Amino acid sequence: MNPRKKRTSLWKWLAMVMAGLSLVAVFACNSPYIPIPPPDPTYSQDSSGEWAVSIPPDYRAIGANYFIFNASVGTGIIQRAESDGSAYARPLQGKAGDSIYIHWERGTETSPTICRPLGVGLVQMVCQ
């Protein structure tokens, strides 16, 4: 057998392995975008019957505007996020059980919208 042929085959095999590994590395570094919704809000009600909405810090929402909309009443609040991405907004009109839709926007970025029923405390269940 010709030694030159063996060397050429070895180089071709190494080149194919390196090309395959490069391709794997390129696709491994290109992860898909998975939108993450805003954190679950905490609601509180004052003696006048108005509600306040508190949204915990979210680094993705720094500099964003939160849109808080009561679909049951048809009113809402727009609140700029704090320097840590949290928000505190009031007064929100409504009654316990109303469907509250929340999302944030920053430039062209928009979070998915969540719907949480209005109720005292941290609300993690979704609207029905």
Image: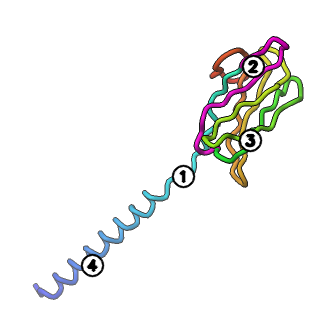
Secondary structure type for disc 2: loop
Q: Which residue is mark 3?
A: 80
Q: Mark 1 or mark 4, which has the lower sequence index? A: 4
Residue closer to the observer: 2 or 84: 84
Name the quadrant containing residue 113: top right
Q: Which residue is mark 4?
A: 12
Tell me the distance, in whole angstroms, between the alpha carbons under discs 2 and 3: 21 Å
Secondary structure type for disc 1: loop
Seen at 68% across and 27% down, the residue is 54
Q: Mark 1 or mark 3, which has the lower sequence index? A: 1
Residue closer to the observer: 32 or 82: 82
Range of residues picked out in magenta: 44-61
Residue 32 is marked as 1
Q: Are marks 2 and 3 in contact (CB under 8 Å)?
A: no
Depicted 107 relative to depicted 68: above or below: below
Residue type highlighted by circle 4: Lys
Tell me the distance, in whole angstroms, between the alpha carbons under discs 2 and 1: 33 Å
Tell me the distance, in whole angstroms, between the alpha carbons under discs 4 and 3: 59 Å
Graded by Cα atoms within 10 Å as few (under 14), some (14 to 19) or many (20 or more), the crowding at tag 3 reads: many
Q: Is residue 20 magenta?
A: no
Please identify, in this view, whether the residue under mark 4 or under mark 3 is nearer the observer: 3
Q: Quadrant of the C terminus?
A: top right
Q: Which residue is mark 2?
A: 118
Tell me residue 121's x, y (percent): 66, 17
Residue type highlighted by circle 2: Leu
Please identify, in this view, whether the residue under mark 2 or under mark 1 is nearer the observer: 2
